Image (cartoon, grey):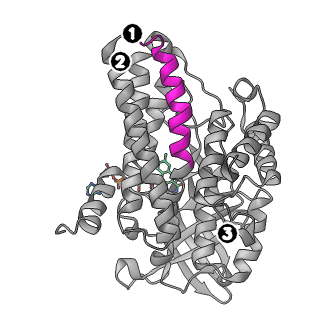
Amino acid sequence: MTGLEDFRATVRDWCAAHVPKDWRSNQTGVGDDEFVAFQKAWFAQLHTAGYAVPHWPAEWGGGMGVAQQIVLYQELAAADAPRLVLAFVGIHHAASTLLAAGTDEQRKRHLPAILDGEIWVQGFSEPEAGSDLAALRTTAKADGDNFIVNGQKLWASGAKHADWCLLLARTDPDAPKRHGISYFLMDMTTPGIDVRPIRNAVGDSHFCEIFLNDVAVPAANLVGPVNQGWQVAQATLGAERGMTMLELAERLSNAGFTWLLQACSPVEDPVVADRLAQFEIELTGLRGLCRDLVERTEAGQAGPADASIVKLYYSELLQRMTGYGAEIGGLAAHTVLTKPASSGWESGAWMLDFIGSWEWTIPGGASEIQRTIIGERGLGLPR
Ligand SMILES: Cc1cc2nc3c(=O)[nH]c(=O)nc-3n(C[C@H](O)[C@H](O)[C@H](O)COP(=O)(O)OP(=O)(O)OC[C@H]3O[C@@H](n4cnc5c(N)ncnc54)[C@H](O)[C@@H]3O)c2cc1C
């Protein structure tokens, strides 16, 4: 066996021993406390095995090559392992930002804590500042060793469970939009923070409003220089649009396609067979794009629109596949109105999956914005 095949066998054995067999039924209809406890326990198991943050540098507990990461994600998908929903922002967005722009102290304070279960939320969007993020109006005014923050954040996924927040706030109201923004790490237990969940189209309330009223954030929690938060935020958005996709593509390829085959089985109609073949081709394309992106990012050679291409392709393929599941899955696809917490966006509960798939075409830059990035920065078209 090659090293990679040995690794695959090791992960497969580990999954057989550790993936909870009945998690789908046990996580259906659970409340917040059970969901959080389950997520933290599953994260701890993955961390103990060395599988929680394979994409981090070795010195911080990662260090897996791209080929190994793909094998890991393939095996987790094949074993139908629960997803790391709660830790997602911490292990991707927060880690990428701290590694790219944090101080040594910030890295030492937070990266080990994330591995111990610290939960993060991204506090970027505001009313009237989503696609046009640079229009954000939350202010942070210097006051001794602190900045005093006032304003409102919107659509903050997982805020009600978060320990820390990646916060963008305006520190110079007179500067041009992108030049007056700073990037902070905000402790969610600080007085003056009020988190209010918003109910979404499938009845969940995972995203929230965050109201900030005279919240004192230590100046030591600035990431990067004051007024240069826009540049720092590109690391966060880059993670959201790109590196997270490696696992998502493997999950969609395996779990999504497995559920779709089940819904269509037996495949006797040539029109259905044709459609499935088309999805298989598109999934192969997606996985190739993701691998390419991660390899080029690691080599420092990623183009300015590469992450946008992957995010756009993934989110629209997810939408097409879940839409087809709802179309082909018959009445059952429309009457299953609960799905397990800790599952992903292709759980096999097609109607919910289809509605949920629209989530992916909006955050981190909606599809229209990604197309503009691809046109202008990738293809060099005029603005
Ligand atoms: C499921 C989900 C989770 C989210 N999680 C988070 C989170 O954790 N943290 C966070 O900070 N934010 C989060 N967001 C917010 C997300 O980043 C914003 O919704 C997104 O940036 C779009 O902003 P908006 O909602 O204000 O829509 P708008 O910016 O008002 O856009 C509305 C529509 O107009 C289009 N549009 C806008 N401007 C242009 C343009 N210049 N050219 C062409 N079309 C345009 C958009 O593409 C979109 O279709 C989340 C959103 C969703 C749906």
Q: Mark 3 belongs to which amino acid?
A: Pro
x, y percentage for residue 142?
A: 58, 86
Magenta stretch: give its range. 247-267
x, y percentage for residue 118?
A: 75, 59
* Residue 129 seen by the camera: no
- Image side of residue 188 versus residue 325, left or right: right
Name the residue carrying label 3: 57
- Viewer-closest of 269 and 37: 269
Name the residue carrying label 2: 272
Q: Residue at x 48, y 82 (%)?
A: 228
Q: Based on the displayed image, in which of its 4 quarters is residue 14 positioned?
A: top right
Q: Does the magenta-highlighted stretch encompass residue 251? A: yes
- Viewer-closest of 204 and 86: 86
Q: Residue at x 23, y 65 (%)?
A: 379
x, y percentage for residue 12?
A: 73, 38
Name the residue carrying label 1: 268
